[in-house]
Image (cartoon, grey):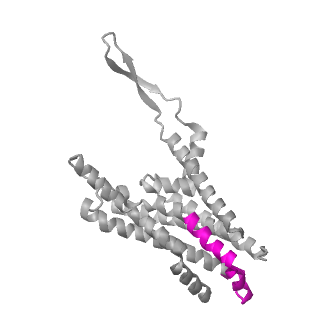
Amino acid sequence: MNRLLHAGFFRLKKSHFLWIALATILLGVFIPVNSYLDYRAMDIGHLPPLENFLNGHAMFVPIMLPVLISLFVGTEYSDGTLRNKLLVGHARWQVYLSTLIVNLTASLILTLAYLAGCLAVGLPLLGPPKTIPSGFLAAGIAGALITEFAVCALLTLISLLCSRKSGSVAICILGLMGMLLFSIFLQSKLSEPEFYPGYDMTVNGYVQSTEMVPNGSYVQGVKRQIYEFLMDFLPTGQMLSYANFEVQKLWLPPLYALLIFTVSTGMGLTIFQRKDLK
């Protein structure tokens, strides 16, 4: 197992995919810089808080992982590296878990790079976080990292069970993008207000507000409970919530993410044991 991990980390270090993802993620640190310049240009009396950008990795990292993991694992298939690991005597569960650990490490590297860059640039410009308690801030960052690990586990499952690189890349990218679009739809529906102010035109041509009018687009009842559950359960829903620190129950999404991580890893280990790698 140690030899597999050593070889995996060596390949990860040499991987062009990781360095491209790392360079891309570091571009995210310029978001607070751009926001700072905009506020200064508009002569606004205050600056945006750093916490508005601090958890941006919750979106950036999972979006990059499908390409990174599917290409990294797919290259092992196409080069015959994966089958050679089995031929020299390594157990299939060792191959699977070592690949998963390397992928988790790549996710952690990207997250730490974003946080380090954001703090290095954001602290001098915007100052320390002000609007969110430190405990909630730390829990949000940790929860986002757990979500990223759950995404890693799902992508590792797909990439190791699909021996064609092009197929695994397509499934990973389209699958995550599909879930993300669905989560954006759920978020937009849940953000609809229950009532909105009504307006009437007076005889003098003025507009005046009247009593609150029920919003026909407001989701309620069992349907709302289902939407809220899906937002908490789906990794992409968690990504959207963590990115803006809009998590209502801090303990719930990490539990779902750990459940997804455990189930997907267990499924992957079971199916990979029987997979024909010829």
Residue 50 visible: no
**Residue 97 at what x, y percent from top left?**
63, 78
**Main SS, magenta residues:** helix
Q: Is residue 209 above or below residue 46?
A: above
169 in the magenta segment? no
**Residue 112 at what x, y percent from top left?**
42, 71
Q: Is residue 128 above or below residue 105?
A: above
Quarter of the picture holding the N terminus: bottom right
For this orientation, the residue located farthest to the top is 203
**Residue 233 at what x, y percent from top left?**
58, 55
Q: Which residues are magenta?
A: 65-94
**Residue at (50% x, 57% y) in the render:** 239
**Residue at (52% x, 80% y) in the render:** 14
Badge count: 0
**Left or right, 222 with reference to 90:** left
Q: Quadrant of residue 174?
A: bottom right
**Residue at (62% x, 77% y) in the render:** 99
